[in-house]
Image (cartoon, rainbow, N blue to C red):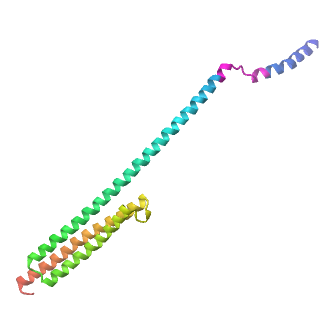
Amino acid sequence: MKTQITLVTFFLTAIPFFSNGQASVVTDPGSYTYLAEQAAQAGETVAQVKKQVDILQEARDAVQKISNTLRDIIVIDDIINNQTYAVKYAQDSYRRFEQSGNFTPAELAQILISFTAVLTVTANNIKLANAVVKDGFLKMNDAERLKALQGVLSDTRTAANDIILMEWRFNVIQQRKILGKAFGTN
């Protein structure tokens, strides 16, 4: 029994040592210095990364601004090309009708008025595009400015198509006149 009491006493006195032994960590004073150095380096790295992110953000903004400007220039170039095409096509068509001798002066005046009406509308739209680009019409942002320019581009494309359709219609009238003269029905 004495051995049992001795064993129980030994275990009861040993339990605190075992529990403290498991919870205590052997520390090296040099490891704290190393951790402090790593923390300082991590702070420096974070600051450098933040600077790089800021530089990249500025570069991205500059590239995006250039991209928006180039996109606007491309749309404006398309507007100019469509308007130039429409004007040239209308001039050439009118010149052909005038030289054909199949239209009276009053009919030629009506043809000229039709072509001029379409070209005047697109010229006004181009003035609007000019105001959008030069004056920042109503302080538009890039998306709004692009949408306005694309609307003008669509209008100039429509005008060019209208000129082509008018030319086709006047060609049909001219052919009917020629056929009427040839067969004496006019």
**Magenta stretch, main secondary structure class:** helix
Q: Viewed as shown, does residue 114 lie left or right of 126?
A: left
Pick the quarter of the image with the N terminus: top right
Please identify the quarter of the rendering in which residue 4 is found. Answer: top right
Question: In this rendering, is residue 93 above or below 29?
Answer: below
Please identify the quarter of the rendering in which residue 171 is found. Answer: bottom left
Residue at the image point whose x is 27% and y is 70% from the top: 159
**Frontmost residue, 186 versus 113:** 113
Question: In this rendering, is residue 165 above or below 130?
Answer: below
Question: In this rendering, is residue 140 above or below 185?
Answer: above
Q: Viewed as shown, does residue 30 lie left or right of 159?
A: right
Please identify the quarter of the rendering in which residue 109 is found. Answer: bottom left
Q: Is residue 57 magenta?
A: no
Residue 59: image x %, image y %? Answer: 43, 44
Residue 26: image x %, image y %? Answer: 71, 19
Residue 98: image x %, image y %? Answer: 11, 77
Residue lying farthest to the bottom in this orientation: 185
Q: Viewed as shown, does residue 12 lie left or right of 54?
A: right
Q: Viewed as shown, does residue 123 lie left or right of 140?
A: left
Residue at the image point whose x is 9% and y is 75% from the top: 99
Q: Which residues are magenta?
A: 20-32
Question: In this rendering, is residue 107 above or below 135?
Answer: below
Pick the quarter of the image with the C terminus: bottom left
Residue lying farthest to the front in this orientation: 135
